C-alpha cells in the first residue's frame, strides 16, 4: 500500500478544492425540487465548476480500468440507486431522494464530497434514512486521529447503522485522495476495531458510507456505472474528505451551506470555573 502523506502546502491546496466541491452543492441546493432533471443539475454544476471556479469536474470522462468513460460531470443517484447514477432527462418527483456527488480538480488537487437531498416532501422513512446515513458518516469521522485505525472507522459506522436496522454496502468504500482521484488507502465502512492501517498525520481520505433501508446486496445496471439495491430498497450516501491532523481530524469539504455536524461530533463545552 502506497499512502501519500500531504505537506502543509498540499493540505492548503486540498482545502481550496474541497471547499469548491462543497460550494457546487450549495449552488445546486435551491434547484433540487420536483420537475428538474438530473441532466439540468449536471449542466448547472458543470458550468459553475468550469466557468466560475475555473476548475475541472473530475468525473467527466473518468475511466478506471474496465469501465467506459463516465459521461457526465456529477453523479446523481436516486431512490434505490446506491451510487454512480448518470444524470438524465427524467424529472425528479416529489418524495424522491437523490445523492449528488461532486469532485472538482483545482490546480491539480481533488476535492470530493456528496450530500443527500429530499425532493419536495419526503416520507418519514426516507428522511430518517438520509439523517441516519449522515450521522453514520460522522460516527466514522470522529474516530479519525493519529494512532487510530481504519478498522475503528469502519466498526463505528457499521455498528451504528446495523443497530438501527439498516445495512452497509460493502462493495464500495472511501479512498485516499490528493493529486489522484483515488489513492490508497481504501476506507471500508465496516470492520473490526484495531485492524487495518494505522492513521498518521498528513493522510487524506474520504469517508462515504452507503446505507440501504433493506438488504445490503447490490447489482450493476446495464450502463456499466449505476449501482442499485437488489431488493429495490432506498439507499443513501454522504461523503466528506478528511485530513488526519496532529491531534485529530479536519474536514476539508466544508462551505457556507454545509449541513452542521450532529451534536455528538461537536467539541465538548469547556467546564466553567466554579
Image: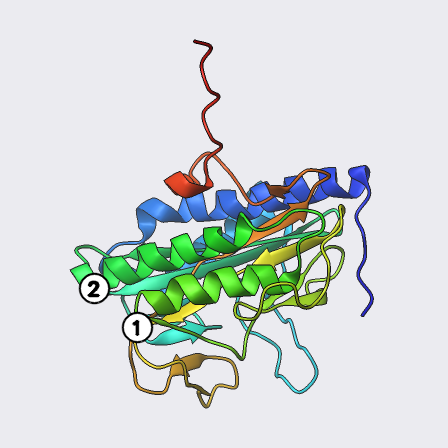
Place residue 67 in its image quadrant. Answer: bottom right
Q: Residue at x 31, y 86 (%)?
A: 231
Q: Are marks 1 and 2 in contact (CB under 8 Å)?
A: yes
Q: Is residue 140 above or below residue 92?
A: above
Nearer the observer, 200 or 102: 200
Q: Position of residue 81 (x, y in %)?
A: 38, 75
Query: Residue at image x 64%, y 71%?
Result: 62
Residue sitting at 45 percent across and 25 percent down?
269
Please state the horizontal and vertical placement of residue 215, each as a whole percent of the image.
34, 82
* x then y, percent, for residue 99: 40, 62
State which quadrant residue 205 falls in: bottom right
Please tell me which residue lies in front, 274 or 158.
Answer: 274
Please state if 274 lies on the left or on the right of 112 as rendered: left
- Mark 1 residue element: loop
Disc 1 packing (10 Å; few <14; some 14–19; many ≥20): many
Q: Is residue 124 above or below residue 225?
A: above
Task: Farthest residue to the bottom: give it.
Answer: 222
Q: Is residue 71 left or right of residue 15?
A: left
On residue 213, the disc is 1
- Residue 125 is labelled as 2
Query: Relative to residue 129, is residue 123 drawn left or right?
Result: left
Establish if 52 lies above or below 230: above
Amino acid at each position: 500500500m502506497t499512502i501519500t502523506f500531504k505537506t502543509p502546502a498540499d493540505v492548503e491546496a486540498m482545502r481550496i478544492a474541497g471547499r469548491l466541491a462543497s460550494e457546487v452543492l450549495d449552488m445546486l441546493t435551491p434547484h433540487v425540487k420536483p420537475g428538474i432533471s438530473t441532466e439540468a443539475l449536471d449542466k448547472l454544476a458543470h458550468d459553475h465548476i468550469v466557468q466560475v471556479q475555473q476548475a475541472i469536474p473530475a468525473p467527466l470522462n473518468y475511466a478506471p480500468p474496465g469501465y467506459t468513460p463516465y459521461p457526465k460531470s456529477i453523479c446523481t443517484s436516486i431512490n434505490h440507486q446506491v451510487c454512480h447514477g448518470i444524470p438524465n432527462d427524467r424529472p425528479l418527483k416529489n418524495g424522491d431522494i437523490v445523492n449528488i456527488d461532486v469532485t472538482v480538480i483545482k490546480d491539480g488537487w481533488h476535492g470530493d464530497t456528496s450530500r443527500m437531498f429530499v425532493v419536495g416532501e419526503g416520507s418519514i422513512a426516507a428522511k430518517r434514512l438520509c439523517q441516519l446515513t449522515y450521522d453514520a458518516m460522522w460516527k466514522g469521522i470522529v474516530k479519525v486521529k493519529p494512532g487510530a485505525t481504519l478498522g475503528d472507522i469502519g466498526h463505528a459506522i457499521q455498528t451504528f447503522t446495523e443497530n438501527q436496522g439498516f445495512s452497509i454496502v460493502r462493495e464500495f468504500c472511501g479512498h485516499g485522495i490528493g493529486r489522484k482521484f483515488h489513492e490508497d488507502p481504501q476506507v471500508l465502512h465496516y470492520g473490526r476495531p484495531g485492524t487495518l492501517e494505522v492513521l498518521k498525520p498528513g493522510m487524506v481520505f474520504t469517508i462515504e458510507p452507503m446505507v440501504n433501508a433493506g438488504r445490503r446486496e447490490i447489482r450493476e445496471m446495464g450502463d456499466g456505472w449505476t449501482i442499485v439495491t437488489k431488493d429495490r430498497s432506498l439507499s443513501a450516501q454522504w461523503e466528506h474528505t478528511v485530513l488526519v491532523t496532529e491531534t485529530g481530524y479536519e474536514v476539508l469539504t466544508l462551505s457556507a451551506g454545509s449541513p452542521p455536524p450532529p451534536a455528538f461530533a461537536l467539541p465538548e463545552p469547556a467546564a466553567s470555573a466554579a
